[in-house]
Amino acid sequence: MTGQKVVAFRSWGKHFLIVLPRLTVRIHFLLFGSYSINEQTKPAPRLHLKFKNGDIFFYTCSVRLLEGDPDEVYDWTADVMSDAWDPKKARARLKAIPETLVCDALLDQDIFAGVGNIIKNEVLFRIRVHPESQVGALPPRKLTEMIREARNYSFDFLKWKKEFVLRAHWLAHTKSECPRDHVPLTRVKHLGKARRRAFYCGICQVLYR
């Protein structure tokens, strides 16, 4: 990497990519990763890049070097926040896994790159779909809503995160009561193959099997 010029900064889902002429540095911030510019704000950075006009420090993250063209490694059409996002391709991929639970499908990074567990819970609450519903059992209208809201909520998530009001907008995630039906929400610690936390209403979120 020494002496190489950064030709681009790109992102794919939860991956931050630093593109160099001969390789790409892939940063994954995991659950608690962070970065700082010019000033080291935490001990033991995982990666420190020094440039002529400043430094970048990365902490508590996964770092991997990728060879070759990143366009051959990443499908930009799967990134829900990319201008290249292709909902038709997402729909085709979902139809190919009809028995998959929607709670797992939304976390599949090959279909919805960038969607995490909070977004999964909130999207399913928005569209009134039970997390244990099967993809192939969803009515076409509900499948369309799930694909659309996965992208919409991702942009809402970023906006609220920047404004430091994200938690104030949660309707289901970590909540104890359904704001629509005013009944206790069901909490499951390990749901689906992904074994992630789920919060949902057994009344307004319909189970499609």
Image (cartoon, grey):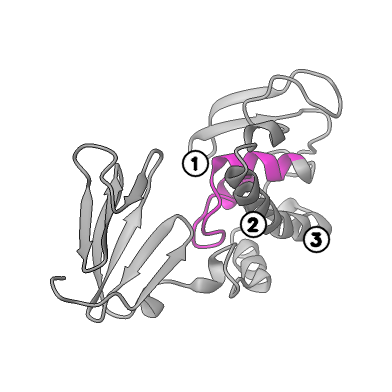
Q: Magenta stretch containing residue 105, yes or no?
A: yes
Provide residue 156's location: percent of width, then percent of height. Answer: 68, 50
Q: Is residue 193 left or right of residue 199?
A: left
Residue designated by label 1: 193
Question: Badge 3 local density, few (<14 within 10 Å), some, or many (20+)?
Answer: few
Query: Tag 3, which secondary structure?
Result: helix
Q: Is residue 82 left or right of residue 7?
A: right
Q: Earlier in the sequence, mark 2 or mark 3?
A: 2
Find the distance from the CA under tag 2 to the CA under tag 3.
12 Å
CB under 8 Å between callouts 2 and 3?
A: no
Mark 1 or mark 3: name the one nearer the start of the chain: 3
Left or right for 110, reference 55: right
Sequence-first disc among 1 and 2: 2
Q: Position of residue 90 (x, y in %)?
A: 62, 66
In the image, what residue occupies the spot 78% across and 46% down? 127
**Which contiguous range is marked in magenta?**
100-125
Which of the two discs, 2 and 3, sits closer to the camera? Answer: 3
Q: Amino acid at mark 3?
A: Pro
Residue marked by disc 3: 140
Up the image or down, 193 lies above or below 199; here it is below
The residue to which callout 2 is attached is 98
Q: Amino acid at mark 2?
A: Pro
Q: Quadrant of residue 174?
A: top right
Query: Measured along the vertical axis of the image, is residue 167 above or below residue 144?
Result: above
Marks 1/2: CA–CA distance = 15 Å
